[in-house]
Image (cartoon, helix red, strand yellow):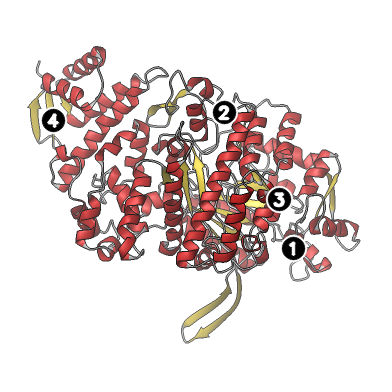
Amino acid sequence: MTTMITKDHGNRKLAFDKERLLAFIDKNTLINSAEYKEKIIRSVEAKEEINADHITDLLVNTALENVDEANTQWTYDAAKIYLKELYKKASQNRAFDKELKYGDFYGLLKTLAGKGIYAPNILEKYSRQEIIELASLIDPDRDLLFDYIGLHTLATRYLATDHQKNTYELPQERWLVIALHLMQDEPIEKRSKLVAESYWALSNLYMTVATPTLANAGLAHGQLSSCFIDTVEDSLMGIYNSNTDVARLSKDGGGIGVYMGKVRSRGSSIKGFKGASSGVLPWIKQLNNTAVSVDQLGRRKGAIAVYLDVWHADILSFLDLKLNNGDERQRAHDIFTGVCLPDLFMEQVERRGDWYLFDPYEVKNVMGYSLEDLYDEKKGSGSFREKYDECIQSNALNKTKVPAIQIMARIMKSQLETGTPFMFYRDEVNRKNPNKHEGMVYSSNLCTEIMQNMSPTVQYDETVDGDTIITYKKAGDFVVCNLSSVNLGKAVHANNDDQDVLKRLIPIQVRMLDNVIDLNTIDVKQATITNKKYRAVGLGTFGWHHLLALKGINWESKQAVAFADELYEFISQLTIKASVELAKEKGAYSKFKGSDWQTGDYFKQRGYLKGLHADAWTEIMNDVAEHGMRNGYLMAVAPNSSTSVIANSTASIDPIFKPFYHEEKKDYKLPVVAPDLDHNTYEVYRRSAYIVDQRWSVQQNAARQRHIDQSISFNFYVPNNIKAQVMLDLHLQAWDSGLKTTYYVRSTASDIEDCVWCES
């Protein structure tokens, strides 16, 4: 029996050529396995007829079946076979020779702009000659940096296709389009060099951009930022306006953090009618429905994290929102929760003291101030605890007394069952806020790494002009997260003490981030205003466990803690210097004057002027004071789960899940191997997420937190049968060590989806 190969949707048939297939394998892979080749041939010859695409799938899947701890090269061979298929499909759709791998880049821009996929900006801003010259940067060999799962993720989620999902754009073209898009408004005389630097950074996988930037740069639709944070005003109009804004951002792929701490509690009065308020839960359930309903063109549900203060009268019912038992009318399973914790609460937990719950509306009206607007300026003393004690002593306020440890027990119960609430240590956040002269940080975002000034947007008037209704609003600080991340596993070489890659990388990375602010198209105008006001960015990192493995540094060691301290101090210096250089060129952010950056308090507060690198820091501080900073917020470490997969490294600052495992989804099963896994790195990798002592993770993050002006998406990995006291001790250690937030508690029982909104 002769097997027939069908092509072109069954319109062409050819007899199977065994020697041709074997030659293809030899030419395009490093596979030297007779067993592999025999299995492929047997599988093909067992069929009377087989589609050519199915042969490619067979080649890939059979290669992946061979992946294990000792045979990691198979995933790169699978990637090479998949690459050949991408080249072939692109060549057919774009009419070029597939042996060239890449076709006419200018023609690609014209074609996809003509189809309404690309925006016309690149073709309008750059000359044809510029584009042709910059297209020569494309290096197909850099496609070989991908393993299979990374290439597959990039190709199926991020490469631009036509409306029928036909392959047009190839991996190196995605990097170049991003570079061209982000540098389009730079001065013409240096623009080409900046594009080349951006392409160098991206194509070598030294860094990744945020998921929305990766997906949408150069396209005719979609914005470039990852996450947003809104503050809800305590009014009916404020609540509904916020919900509308959340929906508008969610449809464009934004993850949302929502602070509800200003909204009055259940039983509060409305217009003098006592007991009329139903509290925050109904509004949170409404946000839950928004998350489900606004599903981003069917790709995924919206993602919303709601934060509430631990002294808010609705906190106990809030902590039960995601539990799987109890009254379903009091549940909201599709949102994420976060709790805002002052130092005083954690102290009361430690000493097993009492805690008091208040209605924020009543506090404001009776006491004349809002507790959420206050924080302790020093550890152990400050405005919050003074006013909180006044509220306790006031006979004019309603209050509920609860043992602090009982609330903490409810927090931990929910965390073990659902992974949330996230922890937000509000006093430490605001003490270390470099822009405290301009506002307050009430809560964080969906992934707990963003710490920026927040305030509610207030609608204050409506007028009628003929048949037009004009609404007037005072824009609050509506936070925008502009993210990208350094790939530590690639950019910090195992034996490179000079860190030349980082010195070259971070200036272009900060410029790319800063340009996102001006190029972005955000539907919610107050977010655009805030973006321009602070010019906030979040430069982060991933690949920490990868880097430790390359260097042979054990996770549970003082050496790892010291290395985190040293490396992140260096990255911080480079990032601040890059922002100062941009300020010299383009001007400082508008609220720089009076900031901790300008006064020097940022550097003094962190002990930089007395440390080992005091002279370098003094020089940086003086440079900042003289020239300003381009960006009011600079660093934030995001989760990076799928972007780290693309870049072939480990996620964020987390330990790996396992050195080797299979990732099973509804329609596929893929082998996942720790990057650069071999006999040299296995010893470090084998102490994986649920094995390492979490106390060492806290120490590492406390060391790096000192150098990060915002925060870190830091997960706890614990067994589901962890003792309550051990869990409590971890939280107390995190708080006492100066961490600003903790993210998920990933227990072996909880079913937690990875966040993809803040990947960078």
Q: Position of residue 120 (x, y in %)?
A: 27, 63
Viewer-nearest of labels 2 and 3?
3
The numbered mark, 1 or 3, whose residue comes first in the sequence reads 1
* Residue on which disc 3 sits: 428
Residue at 71% in and 58% down: 278
Residue at 82% in and 39% down: 350
SS state under label 4: strand
* Residue on which disc 4 sits: 6
* Residue on which disc 1 sits: 276
> Is 98 rendered above or below residue 50?
below
How much space separates mark 2 and mark 3, taking CA atoms?
27 Å
SS state under label 1: loop
Question: Do callouts 4 and 1 mark residues in contact (Cβ within 8 Å)?
Answer: no
* Residue on which disc 2 sits: 689
Q: Amino acid at mark 3?
A: Glu
Q: Residues within 10 Å of mark 1 (few under 14, many from 20)?
A: some
Q: Position of residue 623 (x, y in %)?
A: 56, 60
Viewer-nearest of labels 4 and 1?
4
Viewer-nearest of labels 4 and 2?
2
Q: Amino acid at mark 2?
A: Ala
The numbered mark, 4 or 3, whose residue comes first in the sequence reads 4
